[in-house]
Each structure stands twice: as structure tokens, then as C-alpha cells.
Image (tube, helix red, strand yellow):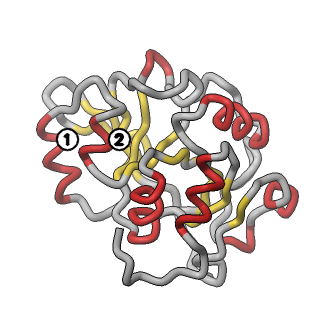
């Protein structure tokens, strides 16, 4: 974690909320997200109920290093690892088999969607928290994702334990990440671009 970076929020305080099983609304490296401790089954269940999302869909999680990512997948193809080391744009990769995560985080056939974030704020927050964070769009299921903070439903804001101040004034409209799975050769197959 870089102690020289200053944010309007304390990453330590946000980390405490996550450790206590709380939900947060926060700026991700793409759109605003609804998040929680990705390893806490109770927190994940609360998040799914709050979002009104079906339980069998799986969730995206954010990590801050390849080392952390490897704790939550059975294996990673070397080509994918090389790509992630050099890829600067937000890319969510669906891995064939997730581990050490609640079932509600996992997708069909135990797949897991993970994004290695390069965003400095998220890097620092995850370093402080020491675990992955769920990253689902900050909207109710089947509603439009928020293109900026001002587009988040006030009812959803009222249901979380912490709303991050960082980037609330950012007017730039954001889009979800590119999403891809990969085959046995490590070749990406794009699901969302």
C-alpha cells in the first residue's frame, strides 16, 4: 500500500466495514460497485438479497495481485498470467474452477469471475483488507448500471454500511469491464467487450 496517496476516505475504515460483514458502494476501475468481503458467505448472501439478484449467477471479485488471484483458482493458464501482468485496461476473466470462496460467488460449474485491478485506490483498499472484494454494479437487478455516482438509486445507497466518497464528483460516464473466458490453449474467448 502506498501511504503517500491521499483519499477522502480512510482505506482502513472501509476495510473495517468489510471485515465486519458490511456492504459498501464504491468506485471500481470501471463503474460504481456494490461490494463486500468475497470470502464471507453471510455478507455475500446479504449483498445478493440487497441487489435482488438471482443466486445462481455468480459474482465478479476484485484482487490486487496475481498472487492473491491464485489463492482463489484451481489453476491459471500461463498465457493468461502473462496477459494479466501486462494488461492495463479492466479485464474480468472467468476461470474454470474457483476455490476458497462461498458457493454464491461461484458461477455455473464452479467457474469464478476475477478482475485484477490496477486502480490505485482499489489496490490500496485490497492491500489493507488482504482479501478480495465482490464487485457487482451498484444497481438493483435488471435495472441499468450507474454510469456515474449520481445515477445510483438512493434506496440502494441507504441499504449499505458505507458509501465511499472517493470519485463521487467524477462526471465521466463509465462502462463495465471487458469479460472473457479462456480455452485449454489459454486463448481468450470474449463474452462482453
The reply to whether callout 1 and callout 2 are in contact (CB within 8 Å) is: yes
Task: Relative to 179, say whether 154 is above or below.
Answer: below
- Residue 154 higher or lower than 193, as above or below: below
Ranked by sequence position, the earlier of labels 1 and 2 is 1
Question: Which numbered tag is attached to residue 31?
Answer: none
Q: In the picture provided, is 7 more to the left or to the right than 143?
A: left
When asked about the image quadrant of residue 127, the answer is bottom left
| Residue toward you, 48 or 39 | 39
The location of residue 87, given as percent across then percent down, is 23, 59
Residue in the foreground of this view, choosing between 99 and 139: 99
Tell whether 155 sits left or right of 190.
Answer: right
Percent x, y of residue 121: 45, 70
- Relative to 158, 39 lies left or right: left
Query: Could you tell me how many numbered marks the image carries?
Result: 2
| Residue 83 x/y as whole percent | 18, 50
Q: Which residue is painted at 22% across and 32% down in the image?
A: 76
> For the point 42% across and 26% down, which residue is it?
100
Distance between the alpha carbons at the discs numbered 1 and 2: 9 Å
Q: Residue at x 41, y 82 (%)?
A: 5
Kindly state the secondary structure of the residue where label 2 is placed. Answer: strand
Q: Residue at x 23, y 51 (%)?
A: 84
User: What mark, if any, has residue 93 been given in the picture?
Assistant: 2
Q: Is residue 177 left or right of residue 78?
A: right
> x and y percent of residue 78 in the render?
12, 37
Q: Residues within 10 Å of mark 2 (few under 14, many from 20)?
A: many
Residue bearing the label numbered 1: 80
- Badge 1: residue crowd in 10 Å (few <14, some 14–19, many ≥20): some
Quadrant location of residue 113? top left
Q: Quadrant of the N terminus?
A: bottom left
Viewer-proximal residue among 71 and 4: 4
Amino acid at each position: 500500500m502506498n501511504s503517500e496517496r491521499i483519499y477522502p476516505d480512510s482505506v482502513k475504515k472501509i476495510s473495517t466495514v468489510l471485515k465486519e460483514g458490511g456492504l459498501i458502494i464504491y468506485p471500481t476501475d470501471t463503474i460504481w460497485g456494490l461490494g463486500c468481503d468475497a470470502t464471507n458467505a453471510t455478507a455475500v448472501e446479504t449483498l445478493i438479497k440487497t441487489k435482488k439478484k438471482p443466486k445462481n449467477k455468480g459474482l465478479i471479485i476484485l484482487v490486487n495481485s496475481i498472487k492473491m488471484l491464485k489463492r482463489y483458482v484451481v489453476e491459471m493458464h500461463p498465457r493468461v498470467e502473462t496477459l494479466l501482468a501486462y494488461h492495463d485496461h479492466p479485464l474480468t476473466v472467468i476461470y474454470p474452477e474457483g476455490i476458497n470462496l462461498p458457493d454464491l460467488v461461484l458461477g455455473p460449474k464452479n467457474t469464478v469471475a476475477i478482475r485484477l485491478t490496477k486502480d490505485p485506490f482499489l489496490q490500496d483498499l485490497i492491500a489493507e483488507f488482504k482479501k478480495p472484494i465482490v464487485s457487482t454494479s451498484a444497481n438493483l437487478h435488471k435495472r441499468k448500471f450507474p454510469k456515474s455516482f449520481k445515477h445510483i438509486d438512493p434506496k440502494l445507497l441507504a441499504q449499505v454500511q458505507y458509501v465511499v466518497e472517493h470519485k463521487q464528483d467524477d462526471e465521466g460516464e463509465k462502462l463495465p469491464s471487458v469479460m472473457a473466458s479462456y480455452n485449454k490453449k489459454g486463448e481468450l474467448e470474449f463474452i462482453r467487450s
